[in-house]
Image (cartoon, rainbow, N blue to C red):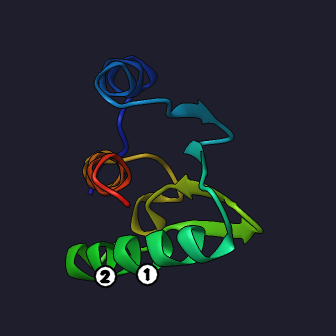
Amino acid sequence: MEPLSRDQIDKELDKLNGWSFSNDKIHKELTFSDFREAMGFMVRAGFEAEEQAHHPEWKNVYNTVSISLSTHDAGDKVTKKDIELASAIDKIYKNYG
């Protein structure tokens, strides 16, 4: 899997909702009404990540989930796999609740 160029990443980020790029990763922070909702989202997104065989770096603090994506097999750079998972995460978040 080839890393995307910075221009390619910027174009893809324009299509996503609220993702940013820094330190060779794309990032997003999501807020929920409470811890239970945040954990429920992580379970749903986790199933999608497993289906795509691509797993996020993420953490949860109370009602906030922070997500970072890069591809280990591409030298921990952003690839199309990261964009695809970010898009799926956006859809889950939009339809969550």
For the N terminus, the image quarter is bottom left
Q: Quadrant of residue 10?
A: top left
Q: Secondary structure at mark 1?
A: helix
**Which residue in the structure is indicated by mark 1?**
43
Residue at horizontal 33%, vertical 46%? 94
Horizontal side of 29 relative to 51 (left or right) equals right
Residue plotted at (38% across, 61% down)? 97
Q: Residue at coordinates 58% horizontally, 54% vertically from top-left?
A: 68
Q: Bin the neighbour count of mark 1 within 10 Å (Cα to Cα): few under 14, some 14-19, many 20 and up.
A: few
Q: Say few, some or many: other residues with alpha carbon within 10 Å of mark 2 (under 14 / 14 to 19 / 20 or more).
A: few
Return the residue at label 2: 47
Where does the image place residue 43, in percent across and percent down from the top left?
Answer: 43, 81
Which amino acid type corresponds to the residue marked 1 in the rendered image? Answer: Val
Residue nearest the observer in this picture, 43 or 53: 43
Q: Is residue 73 left or right of residue 92?
A: right
Residue at x-position 40% and y-position 30%: 17
Q: Are marks 2 and 1 in contact (CB under 8 Å)?
A: yes
State which quadrant residue 61 falls in: bottom right
**Which x, y percent locates residue 90?**
34, 46
Q: Amino acid at mark 2?
A: Phe
Using the image, determine if residue 70 lies above or below residue 3: below
Could you tell me how far apart the alpha carbons at marks 2 and 1 are, in whole angstroms? 6 Å
Which residue is at the front of the view, 69 or 43? 43
80 lies left or right of 45: left
Left of 62 or right of it: where is 37? left
The label on residue 94 is: none
